Image: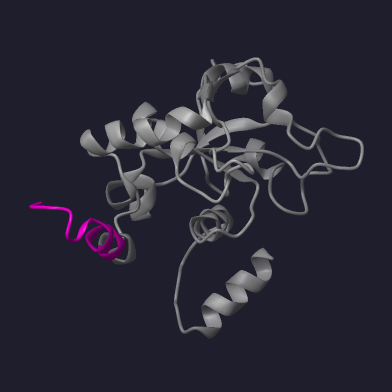
Amino acid sequence: MLARFRQEAAAAGLQYAFDEWGWITFAQHHALPTRLLDWSQGPLVALFFACELGHDSDATGVETDGEFFVLYPNDLNVEAGDNDGGHPRLLADGDGKLRDYLPGKDAENPSKPRAVIAPLVFDRIRFQTGTFTVAQLPTATTDTEPMRKAQALQSFTVPGDAKANLREQLDALGFNEVSIYRDLDRIAARIKNGHGRGAA
């Protein structure tokens, strides 16, 4: 998929000078499945995503529960075998430890997920105070969700019936689709949805 994405981006006349991890981050930014999992360093940004309105409601129309995670990145990297305090590494082609997570390389040295930092080259990463974890492609004999077993991870349930109220409170604090994504489509949708509800 990544090779096809690069091909199509070139065919669209877009000239990018990314290294391999830069292409993976770029593809992730455009919703292509990658080895990266998005995280935010901002707890209210993370809560926004745990409460985001979607099409996930049961037969009664009640939203399904969300999940809010707290990750201790240094501890995760120590679990992955780092002996330098577990400081997250910058996604860069020259990093030998990260080589084992690249597509086509992960079978050579099976490794646990690790926390990494992506260069802040995309607006959305900056807006969402984004960072990542990276995992190898699961095999038939490995866990498909290895992060859930990490000791460095805590999970909290966000009850579905509380999500609408939390969204309102987050909006009052300035955390909404416009501030999180900052694109014109969401700005237009917010204007349209709020039109006629009184003075803004």
Rendered position, 184 above or below 141:
below
Left or right of 105 in this view: 14: left
The residue under the point 25% across, 64% down is 192
Residue 198 left/right relative to 78: left
Above/below status of 147 relative to 184: above
Q: Is residue 195 magenta?
A: yes
Q: Residue furthest front?
A: 60
Q: Position of residue 80 (x, y in %)?
A: 68, 24
Residue 46 belongs to the span the image colors magenta: no
Q: Quadrant of the N terminus?
A: bottom right
> Residue reaching furthest left?
199
Chain part drawn in magenta: 188-200
Seen at 86% across and 42% down, the residue is 139
From where the camera sits, is residue 40 visible? no
Q: Nearer the viewer, residue 152 or 85?
A: 152
Position of residue 101 measured from the top left corner of the image (x, y, whole percent): 69, 43
- In the depicted view, which residue is nearer to us: 145 or 106? 145
* Viewer can see residue 127: yes
Classify residue 97 as left or right of residue 52.
right
Residue 54, image x, y percentages: 51, 49
Is 158 located above or below residue 93 in the figure? above
Which residue appears at 68% of the width and 20% of the height? 150
Report how many numbered discs are placed on residues in the image.
0
Residue that protrudes farthest toward the right in the picture: 141
